[in-house]
Amino acid sequence: MPFRGSYEQSSSNSSGANFLGFQEVALTDVVDRSHDYPNLDMFLEIHFRNNSSSQYPWKYSLLGSFDREDDDTISGESSLLKRILYFTDAIGYAGGVNTKGKWVDENDKTVDDIAGLLNSKFTAVNYGLDDDDDSEAEHKYYIFTYKKLNENVNKAYTTVCPKIVQNNEKGRNDLESYVQWMKANKYIVEHNDTQKSVVNGDMSSSTSGHSRNTF
């Protein structure tokens, strides 16, 4: 069965361009880049868009390696597992990963092409939308974006907070409370130097990014 470890509680089912802060978004594409990074257990590039974004989507990189027990099964406290569950709970995917870290469907059947499956179930209605037709997209999800400084390259990247929720009152309240707590405890530190170069993507896309974060 899909493994939840210690994370039993699931996520709940203005004018002008605004690239930062809370966003109501559509899920438009999932790209599996795992084969390009064999040192990682997983690398999914997840694309979001809203009707006030630029021509480029927000890209959230769900990447990293699992914390494992002595028998090589996934630890119930694994940070990567937590981030997977944020995403799968938000989109309503009943599958996930098993204790070995392999993608499975809701019937515990191994999924060889997880990006293809997720795209067929959750992004097909929005696939290929651009600025001209984005108003037709289904903005089912709520995310938080902020500028985060990558000190290794001295650049600030527009980063998607790994907690993704459904775009309803319960989900919005959940994410807003979470972000407030993360800011108060310095887990989210927003970069304010507008003179720095800003890239509309996720700094975790860099292979130098640390895969074990506190989200």
Image (cartoon, rainbow, N blue to C red):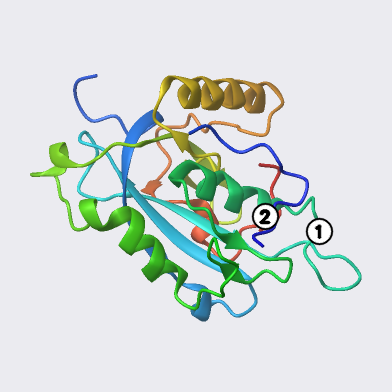
Question: Where's the N terminus, which quadrant?
Answer: bottom right
Q: How many marks?
A: 2
| Circle 1 crowding by C-alpha within 10 Å: few under 14, some 14–19, many from 20 | many
In which quarter of the view is residue 97 placed? bottom right
Q: Secondary structure at mark 2?
A: helix
Can residue 158 be seen in the rendering of this structure? no
Q: Which residue is mark 2?
A: 81
Residue at 76 percent of width and 52 percent of height: 5
Hey, which quadrant is residue 143 in on the image? top left
Label 2, residues with CA under 10 Å away: few <14, some 14-19, many ≥20: many
Quarter assignment of residue 195: top left
> What residue is drawn where x is 44% and y is 46%?
91
Q: Is residue 118 left or right of residue 9?
A: left
Q: Position of residue 150 (x, y in %)?
A: 56, 49
Q: Amino acid at mark 2?
A: Leu
- Determine the residue positioned at 60% across, 49% down: 85
Tell me if label 1 and label 2 are in contact, CB under 8 Å: yes
Considering every residue shown, the one lying at the far right of the view is 70
The amino acid at mark 1 is: Ser
Q: Note whether residue 45 is visible.
A: yes
Looking at the picture, does residue 171 appear above or below residue 158?
above
Kindly identify which numbered label has been placed on residue 75: 1
Can you say whether 91 is above or below 147 in the image?
Answer: below
Instruction: Left or right? Give the position of 171 relative to 82.
Output: left
Image check: 188 left or right of 155? right
Q: CA distance from mark 1 to mark 2?
A: 9 Å
SS for dot 1:
loop
Instruction: Please state which of residues 85 and 52 is positioned toward the viewer in this rendering.
Output: 85
Q: Residue 58: percent from the left, percent from the top?
A: 36, 47
Image coordinates for residue 30, horizontal then vertical, percent: 38, 61
Query: Which mark, residue 103?
Result: none
Is residue 215 toward the left or the right of residue 125 in the image? right
